[in-house]
Amino acid sequence: MTAPTPDISGMRIAFAGRLASMTRREAYAAVRRLGATPTSNVSRRTAMLIVGSRRLPIRADGRVTGALERAEELRESGADIHILSESRFLELIGLTDPAEPLEAKSFPAEQVAELVGVDADMLARWEQAGLIRSADGRYDFQDIVSLQNIAALVRNGARLETISQSLRGLTSVLPEVERPLAQLHIVLASPDEVLAHVGDNLIAPDGQQYFDFDEDEAGANPVPPTADARAVHALHHPESAEELFEAALDLEDDDALDAAAANYRRVIALQPDWADAYFNLGNVLGASGRHEAAEEMFRLTLAHDPENELAWYNLADSLQEQDRPDIAVDALRRAVALRPDFADAHFNLASCLTQIGTRAEAARHWRAYITLDPDSQWARIARRNLL
């Protein structure tokens, strides 16, 4: 029997990487149905960061992408952010039963060695190096995928120590992802370069992304196509709004903000009523310092989704960045009316009201913030403003 779904209402839940079980849009809808707020941004108010299993949020050189970097930095500074795998997220929203048994390790070492193309001694050496774990000398399908990726890395000159160190670093920031090598595929681009096949792209060690041409177009060992070739490929392989949205999220994770913005605009051109595309474009523009353009995107978000309290909050933030606190207060009032426990909105509303001299109303929101978040450094600021 499926376990009861835990109460996540009021939580802010962020996503990184690409989900295998559903699109990000479907995940956002599932989170909203449970009363939580989905976002692609990580902040000190983030309660959970969900890591997709189809495309892990790591670059080809082994470094984690921006969302995970921010989550780890915030965790080290004391923020209570839980990093969960996609499978745990599915349990959380009630789509899988945590009591269901995991896949049994049923493949014997001899068969696995033959499938991977190595001898049994090499398999044993990789296990001794901590790259793989068997159970009584047997492996499961994910182990086989991991071993194939290890073999590809080794064939291309990677040292076992390098692979081992990379895995340790990855699992330290992805505690719920036990076998990341099962979710990556390595492609040989040239004798001197290996690309990581991540989601729908090929990514070079320097972070450059390329279209993944079909094998019959690019051969067994594809090389990075030219810009003209990529443009021709895009014309002959039109992407859906869903695919473009997912690609934009990947680019956001990689901090490629201009490219992400271009993709969100293409999404909007294909599907003009998609509120999340406007919202995410607003976030990208704001992160790039383009606050007037971000304001416009948040207003368009609210035209399609007027009860999105986070859009009202981000609209106010873009107005504050333009030194317009008198207008920001109206957006923040809408945010706290929609979600009275929105601590950050109370804090920013109190700040704006203080700035424009409306101190009696500001005091109510300073007190509301202290009630919601009594122990933070921001609560100390709120208390000073009440003196």
Image (cartoon, rainbow, N blue to C red):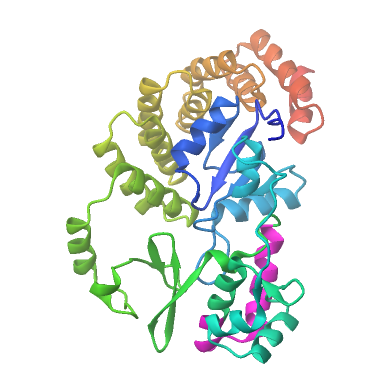
Q: Residue at x 54, y 62 (%)?
A: 58
Q: Looking at the image, is 222 positioned above or below residue 299? A: below
- The quarter of the picture where residue 94 lies is top right
Dominant SS type (magenta): helix
Q: Position of residue 114 (x, y in %)?
A: 55, 85
Q: Quadrant of the N terminus?
A: top right
Q: Position of residue 334 (x, y in %)?
A: 52, 15
Q: Is residue 47 magenta?
A: no
Q: Quadrant of the C terminus?
A: top right
Q: Residue at x 69, y 48 (%)?
A: 74
Task: Tell me, yes or no, if residue 204 can be seen here.
Answer: yes
User: In this rendering, would 121 be left or right of 209?
Assistant: right
Q: Looking at the image, is 271 positioned above or below residue 10? A: below
Q: Is residue 159 magenta?
A: yes
- The quarter of the picture where residue 270 lies is top left
- The quarter of the picture where residue 63 lies is bottom right
Q: Position of residue 45 (x, y in %)?
A: 66, 36
**For the magenta stretch, what is the residue range?**
151-174
Q: Looking at the image, is 267 positioned above or below residue 124? A: above
Q: Looking at the image, is 291 positioned above or below residue 49? A: above
Task: Tell me, yes or no, if residue 43 can be seen here.
Answer: no
Closer to the camera, 293 or 242?
242
